[in-house]
Image (cartoon, rainbow, N blue to C red):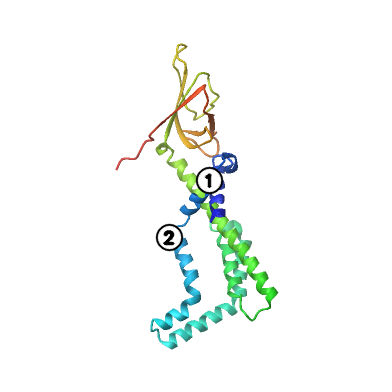
Amino acid sequence: MFYAGAMYNSAYYSYFRLRSLSLGLSFTDIALKSLQLITMPVLISMALAVILPEMPRLLVSSGVPARAIRHLRQAGGLLARRHPLIVLAGVCLMALWPYVQPYGWTAPLVVACGLLLGHTATAPSWRRGLGAAVAGLMLVWAVGMAASQQGRRAAEDAEEQLVRRTAVVVLSTDRLSMSGPPGPLVEDLGKGRHYRYRYSRLRLLVERDQRYYLLPLGWRHRTDPTYVIADDDSVRVELFPGTRSSR
């Protein structure tokens, strides 16, 4: 799950032209993000992965008729014998990669499921080991792609709801190079003021190590810059609530 959190953060911040590694995110930050990725579908999948191997025993203890259990065993055996077709279906999805987006992560997942279904005790040990290794790599690949997709979707949502993020006002002794459009609202408060220039209409993306990463209202991914403001004696940063939608 730590790997998933790292991939999520990488996709999220790269959307705003930032490298997650350069932000100095701690192990705790990534671990907490990993926990947020454990959604209900993930919990259901993990529960099924634990229960399925014990399903025949559970069915017997639950009083399910022996005939129904026998049919289920036969269906499971048939599926296991046809596992090469499942692997082939996953490979076909990879060949159709541009056409299965944004669900490309399903391709390695299907391959992994097919390989695991073919993991029988009668197979040679080298084949079982190779199949398990490839299935593990496919699962890691699928998890990474799914986490990256969630990270980018979260970044797109942040762009659309930018006005709701923490508002930032930057006061500076010297004029800052914040180009636009859209750019911030710049005000000259006069020569007699220590902090002469005031920059508003900004929203906070993240704050790390006394650096504020800011986005102007109306920011768009394709064209607009992300501002990085270092908090020092020449700058004062003020934080305010963002605009909230009325209910």
The front one of 136 and 246 is: 136
Query: The residue under label 2 is which amino acid type?
Result: Met
> In percent of the image, x 67 and y 70: which residue is there?
130
On residue 57, which mark appears?
Answer: none
Decide which of tag 2 and tag 1 comes sooner along the chain: 1
Q: Is residue 16 among what the camera can see?
A: yes
Looking at the image, residue 15 lies above or below residue 110: above
In the rendering, which numbered label is found on residue 12? 1
Rendered image quadrant of residue 16? top right
Amino acid type, mark 1: Tyr
SS state under label 2:
helix
Q: Say whether residue 226 is left or right of residue 129.
A: left
Image spot of residue 54 (x, y percent): 48, 77
Which residue extends farthest right? Answer: 126
Q: Residue at x 63, y 69 (%)?
A: 132
Whole-percent x, y for residue 198 in the image? 45, 22
Viewed as shown, does residue 83 lie left or right of 60? right
Q: Which residue is mark 2?
A: 40
In the image, 202 versus 6, the foreground residue is: 6
Residue 107 at x, y = what percent?
A: 58, 63
Q: Position of residue 199 (x, y in %)?
A: 46, 25
| Residue at the far top in the pictured view | 192
Residue 95 drawn above or below residue 232: below
